[in-house]
Amino acid sequence: MLKSLFLACCLFPLFLSDAFAQNNELSLTVGGGSFTDGDKSVTASAFTIAYTRSIIKGLTVEGSLDGFFITTPLIGSDGYGAAQIGAVYNFRSNAASRRIIPYVSAGVGKVTTDFTEIPAEVVYRFGGGAKYYFTENSGWGIRVELRDEITSRGLQNYPLKGSHLSLVSLRAGVTYRF
């Protein structure tokens, strides 16, 4: 126990120093796409709130809260929430002097229609897009992303009957780097 406390006290200042990149981003994106099981598909709208932190040049870690809404004839609109963590690789540095930054991403998380009562299913995310900042050294920009989120049916009340489901969506919104 004492060794763990000593190690934590030694490493804590490292995280507060400039030893790690200090590039952070907050993003809010909205959009929509198609939710499919391979045979049938329904339209879906989606949103993401994400926090991204640079680790090393080009590579960042991203945590996000995602939601999507599926419209079905019998139920109407049904909502699903997801919490995900992923890696984002920026093909160009995220430095303040960069205006256009293309990227790819991959992640994993959990998705459910009700986190309090229904066990969540694993969701895998693959995507790519670009961030465009309004001026050099500007913190504000636009983020556009095409992504595919893949999950299994599990205990969720999806309107499609297949066991493997996919949400392909295009999302766009604002991003702020600091």
Image: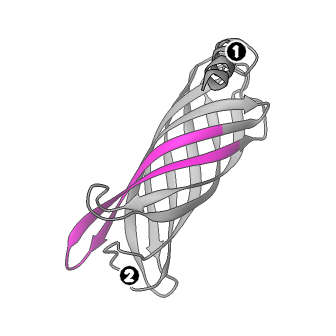
| Residue at point 47%, 77% (across, down) | 36
The Cα–Cα distance between marks 1 and 2, rounded to whole angstroms, is 52 Å
Q: Residue 134: say if magenta.
A: no
The N terminus appears in which quarter of the rendering?
A: top right
The residue at which mark 2 appears reads as: 160
**Residue placed most toward the observer, 61 or 31:** 61
**Residue placed most toward the observer, 7 or 163:** 7
Q: Is residue 54 left or right of residue 112?
A: right
Secondary element at image label 2: loop
By secondary structure, the bulk of the magenta-drawn segment is best described as strand
Q: Residue 70: say if magenta.
A: yes
Number of residues whose C-alpha sits closer than 10 Å to that of mark 1, classed few (under 14), some (14–19) or many (20 or more): few
Marked residue nearer the N-terminal end (1 or 2)? 1
Which amino acid lies under the numbered mark 1 shown in the image of this protein? Cys
Q: Eyeballing the image, is 18 above or below 93?
A: above
Q: What percent of the width, then of the height, locates residue 82? A: 42, 54
The residue at which mark 1 appears reads as: 10
Secondary element at image label 1: helix
Quarter of the image for residue 100 reads top right
Q: Eyeballing the image, is 129 above or below 175?
A: below
Q: What percent of the width, then of the height, locates residue 92? A: 78, 35
| Residue at point 50%, 45% (across, down) | 172
Q: What percent of the width, then of the height, locates residue 17? A: 70, 11
| Residue at point 26%, 65% (across, down) | 78
| Residue at point 60%, 18% (across, down) | 138
Q: Is residue 123 left or right of residue 118?
A: right
- Report the magenta residues as a range: 61-88
